[in-house]
Amino acid sequence: MGTFMPVKCPGEYTVDRVQVQLDEECFMQNPEAWNEKVAEWLARELEGIQQLTESHWKVIKYLREYWETYGVCPPIKMLLKETGFTLEQIY
């Protein structure tokens, strides 16, 4: 899809009454503020994705659960195995 980014990073934004802080690489600095509305906003504003699909949510939920458990993102091989997606589908 390429880079969309109509928001400026770093920056602070209000999404459905939730403060979202993004660093210079557009990563959330306050992950405790994450919710599904924030995820939809990030997808739309940073990637130009108007509607997250069931496949998007499968990956998002797996990544969130792994991050909440271990404090890091999973290795890509684990992500592929656990979601059933190919590398091409992820990227």
Image (cartoon, grey):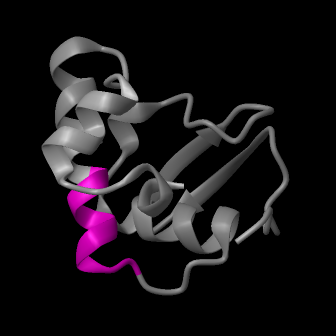
Point out the stretch of residues depicted in magenta: 52-60
Above or below for 48 versus 36 = below
In the figure, residue 84 lies in which quadrant? bottom left
Image side of residue 89 versus residue 14, left or right: left
What is the number of callouts on the image?
0
Above or below for 62 versus 24 = below
Quadrant showing the C terminus: bottom right
Residue 25 at x, y percent in the picture:
75, 35
Above or below for 9 versus 18 = above
Give 14 or 52, whichever is nearer the viewer.
52
Quadrant showing the N terminus: bottom right
Image side of residue 39 versus residue 82, left or right: right
Q: Does the magenta portion include 68? A: no
In the figure, residue 76 lies in which quadrant? top left
In the figure, residue 52 lies in which quadrant? bottom left
Give 91 or 31, whichever is nearer the viewer.
91
Image side of residue 54 versus residue 29, left or right: left
Residue 7 at x, y percent in the picture:
79, 61
Assign the magenta stretch its main secondary structure. Answer: helix
